[in-house]
Amino acid sequence: LSRTVKTLLKELLEWTTETRLNAARHLRSMLVYVEKHATQHIQQLLHALVAASRDEYIHEIVHQCARLVARTVPVDTWLKFLEVRLREEDLGTRAHAVQVLESLCRGAGGGRLKEHLADIFKLLVEPSTLKSEDTRLRMATASLLQTLLQLCGEDLGMCCCPLALLVHMSRTSREGMD
């Protein structure tokens, strides 16, 4: 299993589109079968998923993989390893990490996210994120916020201050696009 995962993750970042597409499809199929065993490769998986999410040809499959990972891997496990990517200096990488986080949240569902909402919001209200003028990062954050509202609506009470900041940020982002 380890050898297969490493090979697929390497091929996910290859230069030929066909190789990346095949690797993404195989990874998606494999994640269905390995379930919780994906935990032992979570750091490498998340690194590759964030990097591969930049690729428009495999973007959707990559996010399907993230949702599959989140169904079986504990939230605190993937959140801990994704935190590093969410603090990247490169705003493009950070935006893609937020997109992967959104897919992970969708895969986990509101019930499993409930006890981790405060941790998620702490990552999103980092000053470098809130004050960022990068449209990709702001839009990814606004989309994640919308997903969290859909998934966890009434459970967001404990996070109302960070939520207010994010709502302000998403409004500002939308106004800047008009």
Image (cartoon, rainbow, N blue to C red):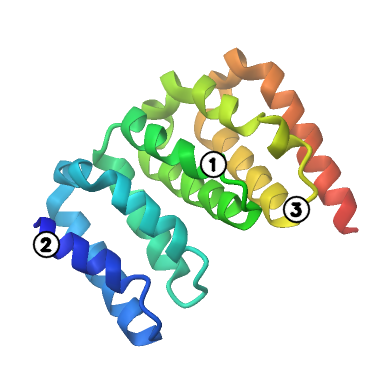
Identify the residue shown where x is 63% and y is 41%: 146
For the view shown, which residue lies furthest in the left direction? 1
Q: Quadrant of the N terminus?
A: bottom left
The type of residue carrying mark 2 is Arg
The mark found on residue 86 in the picture is 1
Is label 3 in contact with label 1 (beta carbons under 8 Å)?
Answer: no
* Residue 31 position by quadrant: bottom left
Q: State how many labels appear.
A: 3
Tell me the quarter of the image containing the C terminus. bottom right
Please state the horizontal and vertical placement of residue 91, each as a whole percent of the image: 65, 52
Q: Is residue 17 left or right of residue 144?
A: left
- Of all residues shown, which one is farthest toward the front? 89
Identify the residue at horizontal 68%, vertical 44% (top origin): 142
Instruction: Assign a secondary structure to mark 1.
Output: helix
The amino acid sitting under disc 1 is Leu
- The dot on residue 3 is 2
- On the image, the x and y values in percent for residue 131 come to 79, 38
Please tell me which of labels 3 and 2 falls first in the chain.
2
Left or right, residue 155 beside residue 105? right
The residue that appears at 53% across and 51% down in the rendered structure is 99
Which residue is identified by label 3? 134
- Image-based side of 152 in relation to 23, left or right: right
Image height of 83 relative to 137, above or below: above
